[in-house]
Amino acid sequence: MKPLRPSSSIIHCNFGFFWHLRDFVSVIMFHITDTPCERALWGPRTPSPETANLLKTNSKKELKNHLSNLNTMKNITCFVPYQSEQQVQTTLQNLSKQPLVAEVHQIKGDIRSTENVRFMAAHSHTPYTLIYTKFTTLSFVLFALERMEALMEDTGAAMVYSDHFNQTGSIRTNAPVIDYQIGALRDDFDFGSVLLYRTSALQEAVSRMDVTYEYAGLYDLRLKVSQKGALEHINEYLYYDVELDTRKSGEKLFDYVDPKNRGVQIEMEKAVTRHLKDIGGYLEPKFKDVDMQGGEFEYEASVVIPCKNRVRTIDTAIRSALSQKVRAPYKYNVIVVDDNSEDGSVDKIKAIVAEGHDNLIYIAQDKSWHAIGGNWNVALHHPKCGRFAIQLDSDDTYYDENTVQKFIDAFHEQNCAMVVGTYRMTDFDGNILPPGIIDHREWTPDNGRNNALRINGLGAPRGFYTPLLRTINFPTTKYGEDYAVGLRVSREHQIGRIYDVVYNCRRWEDNSDANCDIVAMNANNFYKDRIRTWELKARIAMNKKQ
């Protein structure tokens, strides 16, 4: 790994003078009154540690020399992934032009590995360490690194990251990211491609790494850093990188469960489990029993179908539910909840109701806010809702006529409060799409509820034990509502599994998440991180009481 040292330049001198002036101003301001008004005007006035120490000694000569040295200070060691000379050349050139950059190391192999993380910790001898995570070209907005360094000092953060631009050919698009929080445990949390660490925080975290990962090293690093320091989001656009993955958002949703990534998933689960143990959020595999005979239910199961403007699919969804066969003495029904559809869906529903199906219930919502979660709550609290409520989205179908019976069996055999099935990805016409069958094997009996805080979904279809759900209820949202309920259920109860394919998940242009823009994706991800944050806090509090 040969370091590339940037050459000095006139620009470097100018940058140095700029930050010389900044620190000089901070010194002056320390000797002026510190009123609230002035704090609002100047912001935090904490000088660098070196400057602060010299202020205490009142050594004017040493202080003058220190401020002069700031003119040439190179504070950042950079690490960039190496694939080829052509791939890395422009990025190295751009980094060499940055006045604050002392060295640039090229990382061969997977930059995510623990081995490479340890290499970076051992070879960074500057106060800050920059890790670039993409193979694409990196370039900076003017004064970007200076800004990142300054805000790291002002906030005391252990790591900072920022919004940026994606460049695809001649098209430049905004790529904002979201704030980190304690529940942001997804291994695919988008920090952007530039991570600026405080070297001391990075090295301290690496000193606690006692497991060597092939893929989860970088993930393990930020989890350990977050345990003792803040990961600060700078919501300013500070750099450019080229976006290679041009798939729509809906095509990326299932990357985390792609069977070919199973080895990656196992490592990520191991890392997050260790993290949860470190912070007190880990739950032992001990679960409350579920009274399968509790309550009076006319029906053993209900298929719940929330609907909002699904004229092209609602007919096939309902008929798929009505075609189910269950063994005596069990009975099931179908509850369709329409949330003020305006596209003809209501006519489709009423046409099937008119056929005279004894086990079909149609609920028309009023004009108030319901969303998917509110529609589920109406179905759950209906007097004819079954003991188990089983999901069927209005644009999906069951795999065959045995799905409901398999759910009933799973609840009774596994004594669980929720069951997660296995599904296959198809297009609108039923043709299988990659990655094909998704079985969510991360839902292991011993660790599924811990790993659930890392993954971004719980699988489908889902079935719920109605008496418990009537006490929890769904949040009144149209995204993440099922995930929130699943996390809450798993806090105390076992989640059962069906590994047979029982569901067809249809991907088509009208899926609510088929092609979300970046703002919508960020909002969805931030909300799921909030759900994880709330649940993690609840689990930590529960553990403290035990």
Image (cartoon, grey):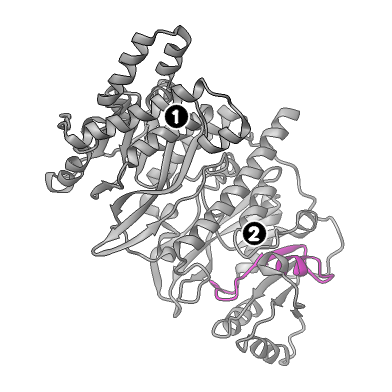
Q: Is residue 376 left or right of residue 501?
A: right
Boundaries of the magenta span: 375-401
Q: Give the labeled residue for mark 1.
A: 153
Image vertical order of residue 134 relative to residue 352, above or below: above
- For residue 61, say whether it is visible: yes
Mark 2 vs mark 1: in front: 1
Image vertical order of residue 174 relative to residue 454, above or below: below
Q: Where is residue 398 drawn, in percent x and y?
A: 57, 72
- The amino acid pointed to by label 1 is Glu
Instruction: Please state, as top left, top right, bottom left or bottom right, where the C terminus lies in the image.
Output: top right
Label 2 to label 1: alpha-carbon separation:
39 Å
The answer to whether residue 380 is magenta is: yes
- For residue 220, say whether it is visible: no
Q: Give the labeled residue for mark 2.
A: 481
Q: Is residue 313 left or right of residue 74?
A: right
Image vertical order of residue 349 relative to residue 300, above or below: below
Q: Earlier in the sequence, mark 2 or mark 1?
A: 1
Q: Where is residue 10 drawn, in percent x and y?
A: 18, 35
> Residue 208: which disc?
none
**Where on the picture, by quarter, is residue 318?**
bottom right
Instruction: Please state, as top left, top right, bottom left or bottom right, where the N terminus lies in the image.
Output: top left
Q: Residue at x 29, y 30 (%)?
A: 17
Q: Where is residue 247 drawn, in percent x and y?
A: 35, 64
**Where on the picture, by quarter, is residue 323?**
bottom right
Q: Residues within 10 Å of mark 1 (few under 14, many from 20)?
A: some
The answer to whether residue 465 is magenta is: no
Q: Which is more toward the observer, 487 or 301? A: 487
Residue farthest to the right? Answer: 296
- The amino acid pointed to by label 2 is Glu
Is label 1 in a helix, a strand or a loop?
helix
